[in-house]
Amino acid sequence: MTDPVAPTGPAADGLATAAAAGIHRIRVPTPFLVGRVNVYLVEDDPLTLVDAGPNSATSMVELERGLAERGHQVEELGRIVITHQHHDHIGLVQLLVDRSGAEVCALDRLAPWLANYAGSMEADDAFAETVMERHGIPRDVRLALRAVSGGFRAFGRGAQVDTPLADGAVLAFAERAWRVHHRPGHSPSDTVFHDEERDLLLGGDHLIGHISSNPLISRPLEGGDPDDRPRALVGYIASMKQTAAMAPGILLPGHGDPVTDVPSLVAERLRMHERRARKIAGMLSGTPHSAYEVATEMWGNIAVTQAYLTLSEVLGHVDLLLERGAVVEERDADGVSRFLAT
């Protein structure tokens, strides 16, 4: 079965509403802690998949099974829509295209990154390593995390984008149309697709009901200087507020069950980020801390695989405090940035 955990209540109602609109969830396994990824089959002309799962044989088998349960096969696909650049969403795209000839649609700014996947990942890892060095992560942890990231690359794969989509563009089908909205934060390329007529939003990992999407410190799609790193959480909060203002009736996320009250979820997330910012501000009173020192004080001995996630978490909230003038940044002689409450 493609959906071993049957939802109940509003989540079940959300899936039923989506199914009535011809959108069917297929839950594809991943090797990552987040668990299964949602791939959505859209029964329209062209027959469409939203995202594709990671590049693994197990994922392909589950995806094929999900298609077969709806009476379809890979070779029938006419379009693949990509919500963002992470491995568990792009890994099977090119393999599916090779079998079906499907058109690939993605944010226009993501297209060059996908076309040069290996080079893009290498540049992203180099960017992340420099950010880690600047914010106090020890060298042995940086090297170990670089190796882990290199091992994960095989679960992603490059693809050629046939139809680049600008922010605000409309993606048309025979029986529906989706408005394209760029919502950066969790990744630089996060894109959501709004069926305004049916009040449905295909949200990728922009908002997930059961977990908070981590706003990763990522290299901008066009490249960038680690010393001028993007303030991912600041941007993510702006993106969430834009989505809350749309108040879609149902959001179909990249993981977990449908979200049926987007404004309330966003309000909850904003309160959570405010609480964390206040906690970190308290930790920075009196003695300057690097972001890594804050992370280890908050979470103890951090696993190598979580080091960059926790660093991004701390830096995101420090950025909120920097914007308010509540903390200042100092660069030590060793090149490590430390922060102090004003």
Image (tube, grey):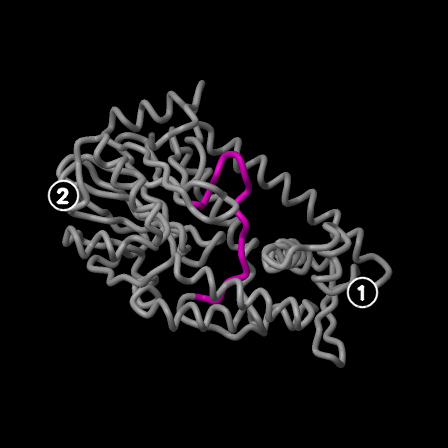
- What distance separates the C-alpha of mark 1 from that of mark 2? 59 Å
Location of residue 159 (image quadrant): bottom left
Q: Residue furthest top?
A: 9
Q: Is residue 187 magenta?
A: no
- Which quadrant is home to the C terminus? bottom right
Task: Give the crowd class for mark 2: few <14, some 14-19, many >=20 residues within 10 Å.
Answer: some
* Residue 121 appears left or right of 268: left
Q: Is residue 208 magenta?
A: yes
Residue highlighted by disc 1 = 288
Find residue 23 and report its image quarter.
Answer: top left
Task: List x then y, in percent, for residue 77.
Answer: 17, 45
Q: Residue at x 25, y 57 (%)?
A: 94
- The residue carrying pointer 1 sits among few (fewer than 14), some (14 to 19) or many (20 or more) residues within 10 Å by Cα, namely some
Q: Is residue 94 above or below residue 205?
A: below
User: From the viewer's perspective, is residue 136 above or below residue 49?
Assistant: below
| SS for dot 1 | loop
Residue 164: % across, % down:
25, 59
Q: Which quarter of the rendered picture does the N terminus lie within?
A: top left
Tell me the element at label 2. Answer: helix
Q: Which mark is residue 76?
A: 2
Considering depth in this image, is 78 or 306 the residue closer to the camera? 306
Question: Which amino acid, by three-letter code, is at mark 1?
Answer: Pro
Look at the image and give the residue range highlighted in magenta: 205-220
The residue sitting at 49% across, 53% down in the picture is 185
Percent from the top left, x then y, of residue 143? 60, 71
Left or right of residue 222, residue 273 in this image: right
Q: Main secondary structure of the magenta part?
A: loop
